[in-house]
Every structure is written in C-alpha cells, then in structure tokens.
Amino acid sequence: MDKLPDQPITTVVAIKGKLRFPHGYCSGAGEGDTFSDHPLRRNLDGEPELEGKSIAGALYHHLRQNYPGRQPIIDLLFGRDDKSLSSPLQVEHLRPTNAAPGEPGNLRDGVNLRRDRDSARSGRKYDYETSVRGLEMVLRLRLELRRDCPHRDELLQLLATLLRDLEAGRCRFGGRTGVGFGQVSVNELQARQIDLPAQFPAYLLSPDPAADTAGEFSPFPGEDITLLKPETETLTAALSCRITAAHPLLIQDGGRTEAPVVKTPDNKNETETDAWPVTLREVCGNQVEVITGPGTRGLLRTRCEKILRSLRKEACDPGASACEETIKQEIKTLAANDPDYQDKRKRIINAHSCPTCRIFGNRYRRGRVTCSDTVVDGSSRKLLFSVPLNRFTGGPGNLFNRLPLLKGDFTLKIEARNLGGEETTLLLLALRDLADNESIPLRFGGGRRHGYGRVSTKTVAINDENAALTELLTEENRKQEWENFLE
Ligand SMILES: [Zn+2]
C-alpha cells in the first residue's frame, strides 16, 4: 500500500475516555536515577506520563495479536516504522488526572531466583517503579481520513473494534503485563464522527468534539459498522480463588519502605521490625497490603518446575537459562539475510522452550499466564520473635522479629491464555497444591520453612463457574491429557 494521497480531510473521529489502571502500570524512563534502577517515565512537572507512541504501540500490538489477518489495514492505521506510511491516527500523551505531580509510585523488587535453592542469585537484585494503584488518565485519540482514502471503511471498522476491546478491558499498556501491570478499565468512553467540510464550522467552534454536548456530530461507531470477531480465541481459563491465610503470612518488603516501629507484645517498649509486609500506595494515599503478582507467578513457576523435575521431565531454571542459552546458540546459526529468518527464529524458540517456559515465558517469548497483585482484606499484623540457635555454641543467636499477617482474605486471579493441553495440565497440577489437604502445599511469601504462608482455599472459580481444586484433574477430558503428560 502506498502513501495516502495528499487530499483534504473529509472525516474526523474524535475519541475520549477515562482510563483507570487498577494495579498501576510500568513504563520506564530508560535509565536509572537515585530513586530506582528503573524509574517511571515522568514529565518536567514530575507527573508520570505515558507517551502517545507507547499507547499506539500497545494498541497496535493488541490488534496484531487478535486480528492477524488484518495486518495490512493495521499497518495503514498505525503507519510504518520506516516512515513510508504515516498514521492517520493521532494518540496524545497521557497524564494522570487524580494524582499530585511528583507523588512517588511504588517501588517493586525484581529478583532473579535460583529456583533450585529458593534463594536470590547474587548481584541479580534490582528494583523498578510502577505507578500508584488506581491511577487515572484521559485517553484521547483522533483519526483523520482524507478524501479517496483507500480502505476507508475497513479503517473505521478496525478503529470501532479497537474501541470495543478497550472498553472490554482487553488491551494492556506499558511493560511487565504478565504480572498484571497495565491492565486498564475504560469508562465514560465518548466517540464522535465529524464530516468535513459540512460540519467544519461546528468542528472549529467545538471545545471538545469527542464530548460534543450540543449533539452536532454523529456517535461513533454508527450502526452500519460491523465489529470484527477476534481471530484467535485466546482465553483458556480465568481462575479466581478466595483464600484465607491459615498461618502467619509474610510477603516481605525488600527494604523499599521504612521499617515500621511497633510496640513489643508487653506494650512497654517500641521496637523496629526486621521483616515486614509489602504495602503498596493507592492513588488516594492509602497503603494496602498485597500478595504480589510477580511473587505468585514465581511461586507457580517454581512449583511447575518442581513437578516436572519429579517426573524426570525437562525443566529449565531461568536463572541458569537452560532454554534461553540453547535458543541463543541456535539462533546464532541462522543467516541474518535469510528471507525466512523470522519464521525459522520462531520455530527455534518453540522447539527449545520447555513446558514451564511455554507457560511463563522467557527472554524470547511472552508468558501466557498473568497473575496480578491482589489486596489482602481484613488483615491483622502481629510481631513475632524468633531466636535462632547458634549452631556453633548451641546457645541463642541474634533475636530476630517478623511482622507477618496473622489473618486476612485475598482473591487470587490468574488468567491463562492459549495454553496447550499439556501446559494446562501442568498449571492445574500446580494450582491443585493450593488445596488444604495437600501434603506439600503451595505456600505464599517468606518463612516457608518455618511454617509461614500456608493458606486455606475456600472457593475456586474457573471462568466464573465454581470448581473444586481436587476435581480439576479428574474430569474425563483432563484424565486423558494427564495420562499423555505422564508418558
Ligand atoms: Zn525453559
């Protein structure tokens, strides 16, 4: 498709909507500062800012994933990187509407775990900043189509489809979307179509064509546009478990917030805590206790790897990068000018990714499971002391205290997309270990060897239907997959 002809503009679609990021988003400035290794991108006033370009990139990626057959029209809507085609869609920078400038976001720990030993790899600790939870921004898009624009109707159809998907919360913005950042709900979506030159005077005088209180422009999309159906039906399962902390639970803050000072149990003194729970800022300034998405994802990944190893099946340790290393070596053998380079690269990545990499991703592929942060309701903290024994003298070592949650409820939300039979079975096997009666239950947070982190699972729902964890694998169709898996 060639460059759009330089004709007068005949159609404008103006769009406005309120975006809300329930878990915040993550979009880095590209370099570290004194606050964080990966700070949020901010403007000169210190407000977090999502660049128009990165919004456009996220929308483009969403369309490409879900409507691959429409690639030429998608290219036409977003332009091409090489500037041979400019985009008729204008996307404005996004700024927060409900947060004070300069308000810090949330600092998150990024740790590269040694999965074989359950400890952090030395020198692999870093942090990154995400926006506060519940941040809101106003999205503004404008499509301008010129006279005799090729594929005019298809462009409008694609844009209308995009709006529907945005409203349904199917698009993600920014990075680290696998752990729930950049999920977005869109409210008060307003879209108007303006025909030029007939409505030009009204358009010039209208302070906000998308909002159009005077009702001069037609709502978009009109009734003659048929929305596209996603070509790839991706959602395999959305699992939500209501879980109660049955034992002390401590998702430990890595030292990003100041250690809380609390009263000792006898109420006589105050003491600084050695280990305290992760809390995150919400937009109104509240601090909430959370079960972190990255933590849950790591927990499930570790359990999947453990299951594979117990079955003496291939499982990689992403820290030791077994799969990544093989893929890197294989890709090196490809000739860069090979016309099938991308296809061959894809095939290599598929062939050398173990089941856990296929579920959770690695450096070369996106994961297919999303675990988001989840707030702990009705929690109460208690200071617990422990006296480790000095193994050399047999006497007491240094007194150590922790401030775990002793009770609390949370809802674990896991979204799995596009999983194959074997991968679904593996994930369900790992999730089954949430059940109360498991001998090696999944435990959340730290202190696992001291009995921390055990939970009791009240209810489980898959795609909004109640299910029992223990029965997940006994269903007829699962049984066969399970047997194939064991072979
Ligand atoms: Zn792997």
Image (cartoon, grey):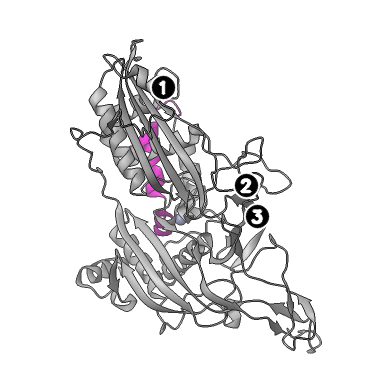
Q: Is residue 341 magenta?
A: yes
Residue 137, given in percent of the width and then of the height, sits at 50, 43
Q: Is mark 3 within 8 Å of ligand 1?
A: no
- The disc at residue 205 is 1
Which image quadrant is residue 265 in? Answer: bottom right
Q: Which residues are magenta?
A: 336-359
Please, what is the three-letter code of the amino acid marked with disc 1?
Answer: Leu
Calculate the distance from the C-alpha at mark 3 to the C-alpha at mark 2: 33 Å
Q: Earlier in the sequence, mark 3 or mark 1?
A: 3
Residue nearest the viewer, comparing 66 with 482 = 66
Residue 80 spot, x, y in % from top left: 41, 24
Q: Is residue 148 above or below residue 123?
A: above
Front position among marks 3 and 1: 1
Q: Residue at x 36, y 17 (%)?
A: 201
Residue 407 seen: yes
Q: Secondary structure at mark 2?
A: loop
Up/down of 482 relative to 270, above or below = above
Residue depicted at x 51% and y 70% = 376
